[in-house]
Image (spheres, helix red, strand yellow):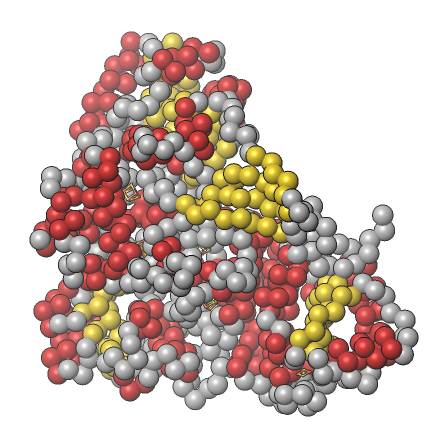
Amino acid sequence: MKDIENRLKQEAKRLLESGEAEVVLAYGRGYDEKHPMPYAAKAVSDVDNIVFDEYCTFNMTRYLTEYPLGTKIAIAVKSCDSRTLIVLMQEEKVKREDIVILGIPYRDMIDSKTGKAIDNSTACNLPNPVLYDILLGDEVTERDDGSPYDVLKELEEMELDVRWEFWSKEFSKCIRCYACRKACPMCYCDPCFIDQSQPRWADKSPSLESNLMFHLTRFYHLAGRCIDCGECSRACPVDIPLHLFHKKVSKECEEMFDQVSGMSLDDKQVMVDFKMEDSDEILL
Amino acid sequence: MEFEPKILGIACNWCTYTGADLAGTTRVQYPHNVRVARVMCSSRVNPAFIFRAFQLGSDGVLIGGCEPGDCHYSTGNYYARRRLAITKKILEFAGLEPERFRVEWISASDGIKFAEVVKEFTEEIRALGPQTKFKVKKDIET
Amino acid sequence: MLKKIGLEKLNEFVSALIEKGTLFAPVKGDAGVDFQEIKNAGDVTLDFYNTLQSPKCVFFPQTDDMVRYRLKKETTDIEEISLDFEPRIAFGIRPCDVKSFEIMDKLFTRGGIVDPYWESRRKNTTIMGYAFDAVDPADFYGAFGIHAADTTGSDVFMVKGEKNLLLKAITEKGEKLLSSVDTLEDALEEDRKYFEERLKKGAELETRTLSLEGVAGKLRDMFGSPYWEKVAAPCLNCGVCTFVCPTCHCFDIQDETLFGEGTRRKIWDSCMFTDFTLEASGHNPRTQKSQRLRQRVNHKFSYYVTNFEVTSCVGCGRCTRSCPVNIDILTVVEEAVESV
Ligand code: SF4
Ligand code: SF4
Ligand code: SF4
Ligand code: SF4
Ligand code: SF4
Ligand code: FES
């Protein structure tokens, strides 16, 4: 891991020096060892502040859309993060030629809030980045972890009413701080539908009903786009397992449209695409 | 009081809405439980309309568009098919009975099909009973 | 007056408190412990470090109804919401949070305008403070002269020992409450000793700290500094830090109407949200996240000091612990001051 940090610093320094990148999006020190922070290095002198350890869970692609199109950016990405890049490129939010991708071959990061390892029940947890220019270490070997959708089994098998109980209890907890939305690299809309006043899609008070409106619509907006980084759930102060719902929507998308989000730049996203031969059976 | 389902219908202007009109002008009988809103194309249907309709007290939602291949805007309903399919999965995973949501392709000349779908759907919803899960908990007259 | 109750009899005591008024106390949920109105005595827990959200909800709930209405053709029927609240008891409040009430009082009652929603609840609430027995690395209440077993501001102060909960009446209000509950026993000499010892130990526990001297002025002076851009870079502009904070008090007023019937309510708002300063014209004077983070920090550590002579932060550490990207307000202030 120290090796990855060193390589990251090396590359950051080189890219900033040569002008290939105006900014390097990586991780920096936080208020203590277990709490690093997202970090944007803009000068060679910033490079020393870069760190990498198992608590660097942030999906740095979240910050890409804050820079004007055309900014030369180098970015450190882990596996799911690299999938986000593909989605953002498909959406023309960033251009492939503007980004230098520093791939981090590392998995089983640790959520600093819970102290638990992130695995494929809370994220995609692929071993290696899918897209990169420079890999900061040796590829991680494959391992049979099962499907990232295995975790859904329990919810899928629940009786409808029991599942409603489950989600209505979860959504009742929501305080509408919008950390889930703000942590999500794909939620870059300004304004977000929930902040619109004409029309007002839901009340501002955090009642179960208005929370439901927010979350269901957001799940839909992420259909075929979410790449299962799990940032939404990790950001949530009241621990609503949003990632489970997103996983389910992704799973359905894969089954119906035979495509995994953020895996190839050549794909067209399933929700802005169709096939003549799509079957009406998907509507049943 | 006996339960009378309240159903929101959203129909595209060129096919289903015209079909509904035809059902009316040719005096085909169908239950009055579906209130139809007209949109230009089934692809105009934002899934948030559907979530909102359930919040405001709909017991069921019926979306109608042209037969695949017949959309006035050529491909609108192909997109709609994917969107509405995902919407249905979302409703179901949240715990709402998926039967409360239905999509039908009904052509402009098919007043009979419109009436039949409405009849069948109304009876299905009647059997399911009132939709209370998503409904805003308030005594609202709808 | 020092009283005690065996920890195994906590339920009985809590039941007795429920009789005395609306009780707010810590309850364990999935994500952590939070203050809730108590219906079942068994829900209350004393085993927590500090609650996820602050106890401001006792006086300032996230949504607070002001008036209900029904729109008619020509007139509108109005039903005002009564502010005659039953007596309230806020149970298990940590010393730093107790201090936050006093800071909020200044804004809600002494700024020349009295907020009846805050005041009517505040004046008939009995506060039962609760000593910390450890320090979390995010906390820095020591910077404000508060210590882990500080009794200031509490009506009753509680210390949890191995077997007993010790309760000391600090004010007359507290004395009245304690003497009206007969499930409590009188404390013995050894309890008295233990209580005093815990207060002493509390005063010795060290949190992170910061010298407040000159901070307000320095922050004001560096309003235009590029520092803010740098420090706000990781910020997501979510509302977590302000929602969990005991001294954040911004609210919006919304008419929530459905089919002609509705409620006008106060709803928490946050200066970290993009639309917080959005004007009806569409103009937004605060478009950058650096401006928003600066507002949060400066409001607490500078503007509030100018207005009310007190920093609007008690160092409870909640914003730091809950921030999804680990922004720590103490570090932000420290580095700001150093950067001048
Ligand atoms: S919805 Fe959640 S898991 Fe999906 S991309 Fe956004 S933050 Fe990541
Ligand atoms: S919820 Fe939808 S509208 Fe809001 S930011 Fe996310 S994608 Fe955009
Ligand atoms: S982060 Fe959690 S509490 Fe905040 S809006 Fe999202 S789901 Fe609700
Ligand atoms: S400081 Fe942290 S909690 Fe506050 S708005 Fe920024 S990211 Fe959210
Ligand atoms: S600013 Fe942070 S530390 Fe200070 S009172 Fe608010 S939540 Fe606590
Ligand atoms: S116009 Fe009927 S579905 Fe497009």
Number of residue marks: 0
Is B51 displayed left or right of C107 in the figure?
right
Q: Residue at x 76, y 66 (%)?
A: B35
Q: Position of residue A161 (x, y in %)?
A: 67, 54
Q: Nearer the viewer, residue A199 or A37?
A: A199
Q: Position of residue C283 (x, y in %)?
A: 36, 63
| As drawn, B131 above or below B119 | above
| As drawn, A143 above or below C148 | below
Is C52 displayed left or right of C232 in the figure?
right
Residue B60 visible in image? yes
Q: Residue at x 66, y 52 (%)?
A: C259
Residue C238 visible in image? no
Residue furthest to the front in view is: C74
Is C132 displayed left or right of A280 in the figure?
left
Q: Position of residue B24 (x, y in %)?
A: 85, 75
Dividing the picture into quarters, in which one does residue B33 lie?
bottom right
Is A147 displayed left or right of C238 in the figure?
right
Q: Nearer the viewer, residue A81 or C23?
A: C23
Dividing the picture into quarters, in which one does residue A19 lie?
bottom left
Q: Residue at x 64, y 90 (%)?
A: B74
| As drawn, C46 above or below B2 | above
Dividing the image into 4 quarters, which one contains the N terminus of chain A?
bottom left
Q: Position of residue A170 (x, y in %)?
A: 53, 51
Dividing the image into 4 quarters, which one contains the C terminus of chain A?
bottom right
Q: Residue at x 65, y 50 (%)?
A: C260
